[in-house]
Image (cartoon, rainbow, N blue to C red):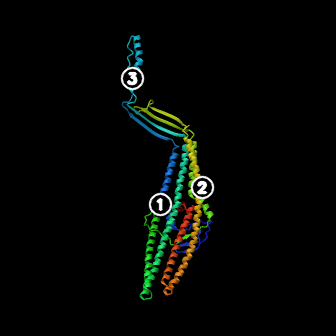
Amino acid sequence: MVCLTRNNKVKAIVLMMPGLLFSLMNGNAQTSILRAYIKDGLEHNLALQQKNDDYSRSLQVLQEAKGMFYPAVSLQARYTVAQGGRIIEFPVGDLLNGVYTTLNQLTGSSDFPVVENAEFTFYRPREQETKIQVIQPIVNTQLLFNRKIQSAMAETERTDARVYGQFLIREIKTAYYNYLKAVRLASLINNTRALLEENLRVNESLYANDKVTVDAVLRSESELSLLESKQAEADKLVKSSASYFNFLLNKPQHTAILDDSLMVIDEWLYTEEETASQAVANREELTMLQQYSRVADLNYRMNQYNRLPTLLGVAEYGVQGEDYNITDESDYLLASVVLSWNIFSGFQHNARINQARIQKEMTAKHYDEVKSSIEVEAAQAWYDMQASRKIIEASGKQSEAMKKAFEIIRKKYREGQCSMIEFLDARTTMTNADENLIINQYDYLIKIAELERVTGYDHAEKYTR
C-alpha cells in the first residue's frame, strides 16, 4: 500500500511484526496482489457500474440537447375518406335566375336556362395531404443554456462515479485488511491450540504419576474447550470477511482470496495542516459541488434570458387533393418565420428567476459547509492514524515482553517452580497481547486507507495505468 510522501523521501517506522513489515520505501510500495484486487473491483463492482451507467446516460441527454440546434425534418401524410357532415348551400339559382329571365324576355329566346341552387358537403369524399416540413430554431436562449446545463450535469455524473470509486477503493482495502486480520487471528488460535494440547498432555502425565491433582487436568481441558469456541468465532469471521470482500469484487462469495505473507507500507509524513489542505484540494465532492454551483448559475441566467423572444423558421413542401397527383395545381411550397414573445405571464417568470437565485445561493453555502466538514474529517483521520501508530508501537513491545515472560513461566512450570494457574495466566496474557497486536496492525492499515480516501489520494485512474 502506498501512502503519500513528501519530496519522495520516506521516514521508516522499521518495525518487524507478524505478517506486516513497516520499512523504508522509495517508490511504489503497493503490493501487486492488493493492487490487482482493487483494479478488479473497479472493473466489476455492480454499484460502480451503475454510477458509470448514469454517466453514460447523461452523455446521451447532452447529445439530445445538442441535437436541438439542428433542423427538425419530418414527413407528414394524411389521407381522409369522409361521408356526411354539414351541407353548404350556395344560392346561385336565386342570384342568377331573375337576371336570366329578363335576358330571355329581352332577346325573345331561351338561351339562358334556369339554374338550380348548388349544394355540396363540407368534407370532400376523399382528400389527401402529404408534406415535408423543416423547422429550424434561429434564436432560442433556452436551447443554448439547456446544452450548457446538460454538459455540466454530465460532468457531475462523471465526478459522482469518481467519488464512489474512491469510496470503493477504501472499502476494498478495508475488507481485505479485515480478512487478513481474521486469518491471522485464526492462525494464532491454531498455534495456541498446540500449546494447550501440549499442556494437557503434560498434566495428564503428571496426574498419572500422582504429581498433580485431577483439577489440573480438568483446568487444561476447560482451557481447550474455551479455545474451541474462540476457534469457531474466528472461522466465522474469516468466512464473513471473505464473503464481503468477494461481494465488493462481484465474485462468488466462496472464491479463494490470495493472502499476502508480507505487507509493506510507507509512513505518512504530512502534517495535520498539510493533510487538511490536500483534502480540500483533491476531494471530488468539492468538484461536484462546484459543478452543481455552475448548473445553478446557468439555470439562473437561463430564466433571466427567457424574457427574450424566440425565433424559428418553418418550410413546407407538399401536395394536396383527392388523388396523389403532383401537378402545378396540387403541390405547394410554404416558408415562414415565426416570432414568439411571452410579454406577460402573471409574474410567473419573476418567481422562477427568484427560485433560481435562491438555489444558487443555497449551493454556494452548501459548498462552504462541505469544505469545512472535509477539513474536520481530514484532521480526525490524521489524529486516528497517529494514535493507531502509537498503539502499534506499544502493543508490539507488550507482545514481545509477554512472550519472554511466558517462556520463563513455562520453564518454571515444567520444573515445578510455579503453579498451573500462573502458567495459564501467562499463556492467556501472551495470547491476548498477540491478538491485540494483530488487530492494531490491521487497524492501522485501515486508518491509512481512510486517510488516503479523505485526502483524495487514492483514485481509480491510479489502477488503470
Indicate the quadrant where residue 231 lies.
bottom left
Q: Residue at x 44, y 33 (%)?
A: 319
**Whole-percent x, y for residue 159 in the image:** 54, 55
Instruction: Give the distance between the C-alpha atoms of the residues marked 1 and 3, in whole angstroms.
Output: 79 Å
Indicate the quadrant where residue 452 lies.
bottom right
Q: Secondary structure at mark 1?
A: loop
Q: Mark 3 — residue?
A: 118
Q: Which mark is residue 368?
A: 2
Q: Residue at x 41, y 18 (%)?
A: 96
Q: Are marks 1 and 3 in contact (CB under 8 Å)?
A: no
Q: Does residue 165 appear anywhere in the picture?
A: yes
Q: Mark 1 — residue?
A: 45
Nearer to us: label 3 or label 2: 2
Q: Above or below — where is 190 with respect to 170? A: below
Q: Above or below — where is 442 with respect to 144? A: below
Q: Amino acid at mark 2?
A: Asp
**Whole-percent x, y for residue 144 in the image:** 55, 44
For this view, does 343 lie left or right of residue 254? right
